[in-house]
Image (cartoon, rainbow, N blue to C red):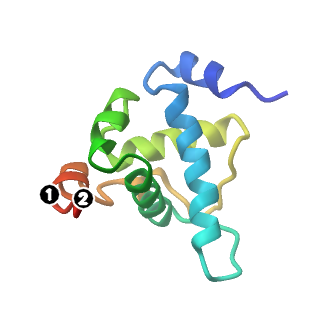
């Protein structure tokens, strides 16, 4: 039986259970927006989907929300993904790497400096 998102988050201690849930929702959101028939979503593509979803949900408050959950960089999204992979909530391809999440974008730049009303 899979552990709950709350249990995974509490055992890890870095991220809120809400952050884990958001990443799972973001995977679904990103997969639905993809136009190809591929089912796999790369780390960079997932980060871009998470950015879009976060801006839709929270607008200018996105950094505050994510930071409150312990998420400060795109690498943090990767840490969450690989934790979820380890607990069988997500799957991984042989070509995937946690490094795919490194510096995909800077939160301050995309969520504050480039924010458009």
Q: Position of residue 13 (x, y in %)?
A: 47, 18
Residue to which mark 2 is pinned? 110
Name the side, left or right, on which 7 lies relative to 22. right
Q: Residue at x 52, y 21 (%)?
A: 12
User: Which residue reaches farthest left?
Assistant: 113
Rate crowding at label 1 as few (under 14), some (14 to 19) or many (20 or more) other CA atoms within 10 Å.
few
**What label does residue 113 carry, if any?**
1
Corner quadrant of residue 66: top left
In depth, the one of 62 and 5 nearer the eye is 62
18 with respect to 8 (left or right): left
The spot of residue 17 in percent (x, y) is 55, 27
Q: Kindly identify the residue that appears in the image at 33 percent across and 50 percent down.
A: 59
Q: Image height check: is 42 above or below 2?
A: below
In-front residue for pair 99/6:
6
Quadrant of the drawing holding the C terminus: bottom left
CA separation in Å, label 1 and label 2: 6 Å
Residue 33, horizontal then vertical, whole percent: 58, 72
Q: Name the residue nearer the viewer: 41 or 35.
A: 35
Identify the image quadrant of the N terminus.
top right
Q: Residues within 10 Å of mark 2 (few under 14, many from 20)?
A: some
**Secondary structure state at the residue bearing disc 1:** helix
């Amino acid at each position: 039986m899979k552990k709950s998102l709350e249990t995974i988050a509490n055992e890890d201690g870095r991220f809120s259970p809400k952050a884990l849930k958001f990443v799972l929702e973001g995977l679904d959101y990103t997969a639905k927006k993809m136009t190809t028939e591929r089912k796999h979503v790369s780390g960079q593509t997932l980060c871009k989907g998470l950015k879009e979803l976060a801006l839709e949900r929270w607008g200018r408050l996105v950094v505050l929300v994510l930071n409150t959950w312990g998420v400060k960089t795109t690498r943090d999204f990767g840490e969450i993904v690989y934790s979820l992979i380890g607990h069988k909530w997500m799957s991984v391809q042989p070509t995937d790497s946690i490094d795919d999440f490194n510096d995909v974008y800077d939160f301050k730049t995309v969520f504050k400096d480039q924010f458009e009303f």
